[in-house]
Amino acid sequence: MIWLYVLLPIIFMLIVAGGLFWAFKTAFVRNDKRLISLDSDYLVGYKHIFKDGLDFIDNLESERVYIKSFDGLRLAGSYYNNNSDTTILLFHGYRSDGRFDFACAVKYYIKMGLNVLVVDQRANGESEGKLITFGIKERRDVVSWSNFINKTYLPRNMFLSGVSMGATTVMMASNLDLPQNVKGIIADCGFTSAPDIIKKVAKQSFKINATPVLPILDIMCKFFGKFSLYETTTQKALSQSEIPIFFIHGKKDGFVPCEMTELSHKAAKAEKYIYLVENADHGISFLVDSDNIQRKIAEFIKKCCS
């Protein structure tokens, strides 16, 4: 029977290790299947708007552009030249793509008269990368893309915009060494940090308390990805940023709690604005209340450029 006392702890450790590797793979490892699609339940009623936006993008002349990331990855994006002195850079959400996440926004910004860059975030689309880092490494890519646009196309003004993880990405980049002509940030339904959203999703989707395993996941992130889950938060970055920011979030967001945007808004020390949309789920505030959001974005951009 002594062998049982040896075998059972080994089996337990193997089960725990397997669970941790499953969690790491599920959360961080590249998966090119989009997390949200047109068939998602909460997009019912908006499919025709999405399709119209996608058709607009697909028929819009663009230039495919590439840069090298700070850690040597080839990153891809699509640049839409509108002969403007103002360019907006768009960063999509977790396991998605810019064409989908900004299907309607690209049309809006082009009609506003802006140039548009739609980025493939690392480990998504045509961009290289094996791991998604919840904004930690992606925030440095924002700096690289901003410098590329600045040097290549010489815009007078630049704006950074993101949705979901893309919003977290641009918020976390706000205190980095961005070009002086980055005049404002638009953050739609971003989470506050990697640990915060991991704990929330684990509890909601798997009924698991992820707090005890986060330090182990952090060790795995350091070993496999050379980053830490705890490197920064949106609150820390925004408390050190001078860039004006406009926050957007749906009050019925079932994925990223609206409270996370409220916490980011509270921490921001620069000029800041917030608009919370009634009855909007995750990432669709632009669709639910498009007239008001478009008007407020236009006012924000005009004010930042004046």
Image: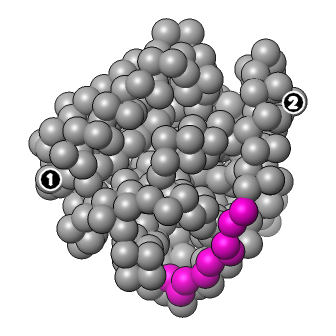
Asked if residue 246 shows in the view, the reply is yes
Per the image, label 2 sits on a secondary structure element best described as loop
Residue farthest toward the top in the current orientation of the protein: 278
Residue found 38% across the figure and 82% down from its top:
151
Residue 247 in percent (x, y) is at 35, 33
Distance Cα–Cα, label 1 vs label 2: 40 Å
Q: Residue at x 62, y 78 (%)?
A: 65
Of the two numbered discs 1 and 2 on the same chain, state the one appearing first in sequence. Answer: 2
In this view, the residue farthest toward the bottom is 72
Q: In which quarter of the image is residue 196?
A: top left
- Residue furthest to the front: 83
Q: Mark 2 points at which residue?
A: 39
Q: Is residue 10 visible?
A: no
Q: Mark 1 points at which residue?
A: 242
Q: Return the x and y of residue 129 as percentages of the image width and height.
A: 65, 76
Q: Which amino acid does label 1 sit on?
A: Glu
Q: Is 79 located above or below residue 92 in the figure?
A: below
Under mark 2, the amino acid is Asp
The magenta span reads 61-69
